[in-house]
């Protein structure tokens, strides 16, 4: 029997840990640091080591004979956790520090795409101290366009300005106040979704599609968040579309990364807008998405440990997904995303826990589970249609009854229908 180690503590990591706990070959799933909401599963154990404490994680993996480590969040990747584990001959799923540049340097990602003709929004890159040329370019281009700060900004690096004044203030703030390089790029119209693949060099395993909801309020209003919900899969995305994304985007990127000496290993998350001219990339992330993972992984029919072994050994595997939909709704603390209330008591009925994945959770000896941070948990529903999955997810949410929290009411509305005309126009061609 195998032991695995999951790095991270949120809802995404709970979903990954639960998937591994359902594997026939896995005996123990350690999560560092994990959260106490995960512990109702007998196979899961939390380990008190933070995601940035790489030396301690290596020591833990060695002492406990961990067979496979899976990295959830981006910070340890940027710190080189995968390089360090590999140096110690420890099996790990994730990209090296230099391959993780696909996520943490937009300029690097755009360059690679250009080298292999992967379609993306037209763009121009500006160094931090060149505000006046950025301003001139923005004014020549005219609205709408998108401004992106380079480097990890925890989701706050993308602005779609509504007025030229807002555009110039944003550019000034990013380039002069925060000293960040920026990209100004064309605004793409089409249907947006996230696409996942496991890549090891030139070996690619497809992991499916999902849509997430980033804004805090219904109708995609209000501030950006870490994600208020998601559904999977994208209803109009079929085998034809998968073949196109793989052959026009994922495989060329994987092959090119090998050619330039930084082979990609781990999960490639491709943010795509399917336009009337086909799919165009808006970003790469080098990890699973949160909250996409929470709705994606329960659809996988294969044993996840087998999938990871096939990934690490470059061996063939036939990936099968259940023929159903999942919807996940995030429960957030009042005040999220700016000033979330903390330590909200969470009394959750036992029969609900199998439909819940926990995120920002702590525990006290007197009060039991308490919230910690903005996003507390995600409630899940599945069904034969997106509508049925949505109804089931909201049944869970309505039964929660936790004070000082809120959730969006419109998760699972077929958001990928937004600008679906562009996809249909493309499908007719
Ligand atoms: P990101 O942080 O790169 O995922 O961007 C945040 C959001 O901005 C995306 O989910 C898209 O909805 C939007 N976005 C980013 N780039 C573009 C683009 N070139 N055209 C249209 N929308 C975009
Ligand atoms: N759901 C967006 C992300 O994980 O970056």
Image: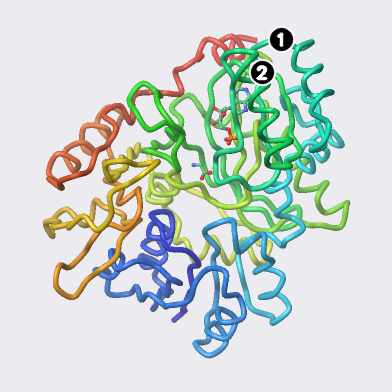
Residue 255, disc: none
> Image check: 162 left or right of 24?
right
Please state, as top left, top right, bottom left or bottom right, where the N terminus lies in the image. bottom left
Q: Is mark 2 within 8 Å of ligand 1?
A: yes
Question: What residue did someone put label 2 on?
Answer: 145
Residue that numbered label 1 is attached to: 142
Looking at the picture, tell me which residue is in the foreground, 313 or 177. Answer: 177
What secondary structure is found at the residue carrying circle 2?
Answer: strand
Q: Residue at x 55, y 63 (%)?
A: 71
Q: Residue at x 30, y 29 (%)?
A: 385
Outermost residue on the bottom side: it is 63
Say which residue appears at 57% left-offset and 17% top-offset. 190
Discs 1, 2 touching: Cβ within 8 Å: yes
Up-down relation of residue 51 to residue 346 (above or below) = below
Horizontal and vertical percent position of residue 397: 19, 41
Q: Is 402 situated left or right of 110 in this image?
A: left
The way the protein has been coloured in the rendering is rainbow
- Position of residue 329 measured from the top left corner of the image (x, y, whole percent): 30, 40
In front: 178, or 66?
178
Task: Classify residue 348 as left or right of residue 96.
Answer: left
- Tell me if residue 29 comes above or below residue 197 in the rendering: below
Expressed as whole percent of the image width and height from the top left, the position of residue 393 reads: 24, 39
Q: Please tell me whether residue 1 is drawn above or below residue 111 in the rendered image.
A: below
Task: Report the residue at 64% width, 18% height from top.
Answer: 188
1 with respect to 188 (left or right): left
Task: Please tell me in which quarter of the rendered image ligand 1 is found.
Answer: top right
Measure how far apart labels 1 and 2 are at the Cα level: 7 Å
Q: Quadrant of residue 117?
A: top right
The quarter of the image holding the C terminus is top right
């Amino acid at each position: 029997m195998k032991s695995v180690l999951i790095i991270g503590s949120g809802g995404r990591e709970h979903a990954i840990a639960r998937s591994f706990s359902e594997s026939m070959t896995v005996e123990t799933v350690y999560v560092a640091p994990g959260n106490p909401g995960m512990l109702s599963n007998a196979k899961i154990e939390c380990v008190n080591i933070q995601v940035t404490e790489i030396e301690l994680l290596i020591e833990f993996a060695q002492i406990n004979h961990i067979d496979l480590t899976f990295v959830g969040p981006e910070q340890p990747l940027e710190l080189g956790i995968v390089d360090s584990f590999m140096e110690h001959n420890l099996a790990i799923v994730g990209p090296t520090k230099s391959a993780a540049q696909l996520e943490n340097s937009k300029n690097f990602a755009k360059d690679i795409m250009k080298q292999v003709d992967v379609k993306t929004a037209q763009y121009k890159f500006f160094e931090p101290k060149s505000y006046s040329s950025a301003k001139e370019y923005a004014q020549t281009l005219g609205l709408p366009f998108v401004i992106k700060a380079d480097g990890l900004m925890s989701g706050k690096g993308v602005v779609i300005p509504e007025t030229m004044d807002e555009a110039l203030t944003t550019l000034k703030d990013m380039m002069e106040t925060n000293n960040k390089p920026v990209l100004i790029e064309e605004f793409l119209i089409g249907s947006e979704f996230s696409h996942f693949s496991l890549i090891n060099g030139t070996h690619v395993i497809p992991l499916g599609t999902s849509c997430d909801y980033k804004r805090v309020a219904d109708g995609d209003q209000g501030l950006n968040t870490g994600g208020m919900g998601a559904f999977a899969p994208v209803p109009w995305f079929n085998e034809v579309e998968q073949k196109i994304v793989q052959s026009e985007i994922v495989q060329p990127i994987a092959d090119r990364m090998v050619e330039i000496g930084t082979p990609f290993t781990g999960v490639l998350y491709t943010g795509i807008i399917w336009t009337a001219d086909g799919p165009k990339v808006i970003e790469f992330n080098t990890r699973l998405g949160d909250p996409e993972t929470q709705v994606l992984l329960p659809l996988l029919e294969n044993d996840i440990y087998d999938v990871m072994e096939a990934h690490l050994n470059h061996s063939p595997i036939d990936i099968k997904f259940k023929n159903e939909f999942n919807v996940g709704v995030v429960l957030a603390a009042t005040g999220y995303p700016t000033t979330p209330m903390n330590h909200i008591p969470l009394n959750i009925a036992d029969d609900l826990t199998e439909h819940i994945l926990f995120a920002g959770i702590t525990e006290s000896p007197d009060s039991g589970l308490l919230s910690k941070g903005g996003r507390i948990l995600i409630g899940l529903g599945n069904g034969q249609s997106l509508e049925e999955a949505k109804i089931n997810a909201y049944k869970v949410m309505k039964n929660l009854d936790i004070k000082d929290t809120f959730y969006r009411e419109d998760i699972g509305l077929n958001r990928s229908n937004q600008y679906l005309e562009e996809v249909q126009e493309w499908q007719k061609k």
